[in-house]
Image (spheres, rainbow, N blue to C red):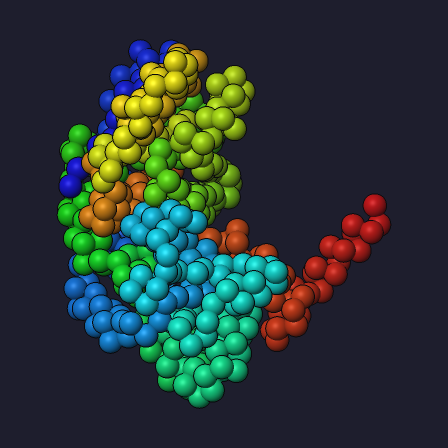
Amino acid sequence: MKIRFDATNLHAFMVGEHGLAPSEIKSNIPAAKAAIEQFQLAVKEGKYGFPELPFQTEEHREILAYAAQLQGSYDTVCLVGIGGSALGAWALDCALRGPHPVQKAFSVKNPRLVILDNVDPSFILAALESMNPRRTMVVVAAKSGATAETVAVFLHVKDWLTRSLGKKASQRIVAVTSEHRGDLKVLATQEGYRTFHLWENVGGRFSVLSAIGLVPAALAGMDIRKLAKGAAAITKLCWNRDLEKNVALKAALFHYLMLSYRNKTIQVAFPYSNRLWGVAFWFRQLWAESLGKRTNRAGEVIHAGQTPVAALGATDQHSQVQLYMEGPNDKVFTFWGVDKFPDPGRIPKIKTGLEAFDYLGGQTLAKLLTAERLSTAAALTAAHRPNCSFLLDRVDEEHVGAFLQIMEFETAFMGELLNINAFDQEGVELGKKFTFGLMGRRGFENFRDEFRAYEKKQQGR
């Protein structure tokens, strides 16, 4: 397994004043080492649990045994969740089973994954029409057990199953939630759903290698042992103090410097792989929700954060790169490249007598995609736009598990460098509370009243 991080195009000798000077990097290496020490101490104290997830072999055995018991009885895995309870599973599915919508035809031997992560009625009702309740396994995932969107959609799915299967519907439902709190846990116990639990010290956006991601992955036929193996191997490197060996720490330091020293407030995650497109959407939540904070740990108002944008190479060279080349120089670009493809896609050598066609014949799609990535990086560099690259040897279970773990460690280290709590999400909570109030949930009447006051203020303009 091999994953490299190349920061060459973040240096001043490549992109001029928008790049970093050697003295700036060198003077901040002690801060990077302090970040790893502080985070490791917090993990040892039990505050944060994601670094330990790849080593939970007993849970992995339980999940695989459950999936093996049901194998052949369904052709669809329907995941009901939102945010961290959905994006991780989608990232795994796209990376390991093929990008949507061009996966192989689904069957009981190759079940598909359908993710219901919104409450748009046209989307939910169309999804239910597309599935057969007698050949569907439902995974309902919510750490709190009370997420309004997940609960509402699950009530639809539960009714859909029950109308077809009656009391046997409970045998087709597995719940992933907290062990000691939440109404989903209560319902799962009452109705006898198979249940897997989440650690309290693992937040949703850091939970892809917990039961949240691994249960739907195993049911869909992915090798979760290899995922964990790759993540476990990279975890050991992520505790290394050597910046050249610890790609997560090095990436965190350089992105911290680009934000703090060069005011690059936007990071474009730019995978040149359709299989990594789902990972880019997962990363958006991880980076945005973890690092977008109003205050630092001292309570000072700092409005920290770096806005993540997802772009797909080479597709978005034709939709976004004009802005990136000539628009505001407020971005840092992180390319995700793949060295080896299972099939490079040799281009047929058909002579047409036309230069635009004939020079490509006999070459490969993989070579073209790599050339597109390298050329875009070179063009951005020429325009003094700082960029860097993560390079995966290949996209398989071990590399994907490792890459996801690198992203999580990088985010945690970035939080330490910014002196913020990367593991809370207070900015999300007020909107949730307003929603509870508007939908009539008991105990949230004051938020309903506060929303009414907001409406009156709008009308009084």
Residue 326 left/right relative to 111: right
**Residue 209 appearing in the image:** yes
Q: How many marks?
A: 0
- Residue 205's place in the image compared with 260, above or below, is below
Expressed as whole percent of the image width and height from the top left, the position of residue 446 reads 66, 67
Q: Residue at coordinates 45% horizontally, 83% vertically from top-left?
A: 165
Kindly give the residue lying farthest to the right in the view shown.
Answer: 460
Q: Camera-side residue: 184 or 455?
A: 184
**Residue 200 appearing in the image:** no
Q: Camera-side residue: 147 or 3?
A: 3
Q: Camera-side residue: 309 or 180?
A: 309
Q: Residue at coordinates 50% horizontally, 73% vertically from top-left?
A: 157
* Image quadrant in which the C terminus is located: top right
Q: Residue at coordinates 52% horizontally, 54% vertically from top-left?
A: 428
Residue 375 left/right relative to 36: right
Expressed as whole percent of the image width and height from the top left, the position of residue 49 reads 27, 58
* Image quadrant in which the N terminus is located: top left
Residue 252 left/right relative to 237: right
Determine the image quadrant of residue 438: bottom right
Expressed as whole percent of the image width and height from the top left, the position of residue 404 reads 29, 47
Kindly give the residue lying farthest to the bottom in the view shown.
Answer: 167
Q: Residue at coordinates 52% horizontally, 76% vertically from top-left?
A: 160
Expressed as whole percent of the image width and height from the top left, the position of residue 361 reads 31, 22
- Residue 258's place in the image compared with 170, above or below, is above
